[in-house]
Image (cartoon, rainbow, N blue to C red):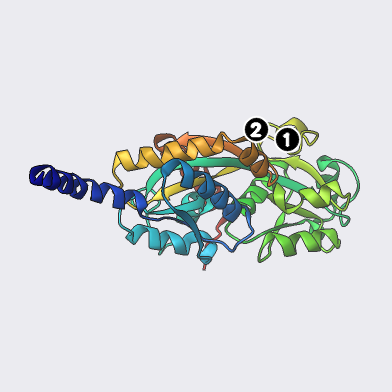
């Protein structure tokens, strides 16, 4: 009896660390306020991952520096899989070319876990632009260079440089006007204060459906599922494309088995039709890829944006 009792206690003791590890809370940090696309995606994932992993998964919003601040925290976290960041690609592939004192190396300082979604951008004309297709709007801008302005949700963002590439590819000198967020930019677009906006479709798609503005192009290689009637830039004779992604990252040195376990939970979550539909509402595309593919995509985007950003001469303060 005593031997069986001690054996049972020993077995329980050996099982305890594993059980405790399963019970530890996973934090998904989001470097933006609640309510935005990054926050919504993180919460959709957390709800499903909580079930598949058998662990508590919470989302913590820590806005600041366009998502760069939270990456500094991730860099210093323990590599145990308990701290993750859902990051837009801009912080990983645009910021390194803009900030000479960036407090992280986007390749060396993090462990890629999963690509979550991909997305392109909407080119939206407001009542301050003439009626017609994108070519009509650009022709008017060429004829009225003092009005050839385009809005984005901020300087140093992917839309900022996508707009510059649009100007170069179409032979239209466009002037960037940076706003503090997509909502105020969209309001000025609706009000006619600025004729054109380049940003995520989520910022203008509802206004487009209501007839307040017109999305005249998408920047992807293919038409958007959210906007199937809107042609791409290439379909309109402008040889240019731009896209971006959200990725889930961990601290440096995360063990492969931990990465794989979390990635499988992400992949399962993104198969859910309800989650897919909620992501599509934001003009995003559920597009899971494992760690190695996320790493390769990140490096490819880093190389893609280097030349146009350096050519622009723009440097963040």
Across and down, in percent, residue 10 comes to 15, 47
Q: Which quadrant of the rendered structure holds the N terminus?
A: top left
Picture quadrant of residue 184 = bottom right
Across and down, in percent, residue 204 comes to 76, 52
Residue visible at 64% across and 59% down in the picture: 35
Front in this rendered view, residue 112 or 127: 112
Check the image and name the residue furthest to the left: 3
Across and down, in percent, residue 44 comes to 57, 48
Residue visible at 35% across and 58% down in the picture: 75
- For the question of whether residue 241 can be seen, the reply is no
Picture quadrant of residue 290 = top left
Helix, strand or loop at label 2? It is: loop
Drawn side of residue 178 relative to residue 118, left or right = right
Q: Determine crowd level at label 2: few under 14, some 14-19, many 20+ residues with C-alpha closer than 10 A.
A: some
Drawn side of residue 111 relative to residue 187, left or right = left
Front in this rendered view, residue 304 or 247: 247
Helix, strand or loop at label 1? It is: loop
Of label 2 and label 1, which has the lower sequence position? 2
- For the question of whether residue 272 can be seen, the reply is yes
Q: Return the residue at label 2.
A: 221
Q: Is residue 142 above or below residue 73?
A: above
Q: Return the residue at label 1.
A: 232
Check the image and name the residue furthest to the front: 1
């Amino acid at each position: 009896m005593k031997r069986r009792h001690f054996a049972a206690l020993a077995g329980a003791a050996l099982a305890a660390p594993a059980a405790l590890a399963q019970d530890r809370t996973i934090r998904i940090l989001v470097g933006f306020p609640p309510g935005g696309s990054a926050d919504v995606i993180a919460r959709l994932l957390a709800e499903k991952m909580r079930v598949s992993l058998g662990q508590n998964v919470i989302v913590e919003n820590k806005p600041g520096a366009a998502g760069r601040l939270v990456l500094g925290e991730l860099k210093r976290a323990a590599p145990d899989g308990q701290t993750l960041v859902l990051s837009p690609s801009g912080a990983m592939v645009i910021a390194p070319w803009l900030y000479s004192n960036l407090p992280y190396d986007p390749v060396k300082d993090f462990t890629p876990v999963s690509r979550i979604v991909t997305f392109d951008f909407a080119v939206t004309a407001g009542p301050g632009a003439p009626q017609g297709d994108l070519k009509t709007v650009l022709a008017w801008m060429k004829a009225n260079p003092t009005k050839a302005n385009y809005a984005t949700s901020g300087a140093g963002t992917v839309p900022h440089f996508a707009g510059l590439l649009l100007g170069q590819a179409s032979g239209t000198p466009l002037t960037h006007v940076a706003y503090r967020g997509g909502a105020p930019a969209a309001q000025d677009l609706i009000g006619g204060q600025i004729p054109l906006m380049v940003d995520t479709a989520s910022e203008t798609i509802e206004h487009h459906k209501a007839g307040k503005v017109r999305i005249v192009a998408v920047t992807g290689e293919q038409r958007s599922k959210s906007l199937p009637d809107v042609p791409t830039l290439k379909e309109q004779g402008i040889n240019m494309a731009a896209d971006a992604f959200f990725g889930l990252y961990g601290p440096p040195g995360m063990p492969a088995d931990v990465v794989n376990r979390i990635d499988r939970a992400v992949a399962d979550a993104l198969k859910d039709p309800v989650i897919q539909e909620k992501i599509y509402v934001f003009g995003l595309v559920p597009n899971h890829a494992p760690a190695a593919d996320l790493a390769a995509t990140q490096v490819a985007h880093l190389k893609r944006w280097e030349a146009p950003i350096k050519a622009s001469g723009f440097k963040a303060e």
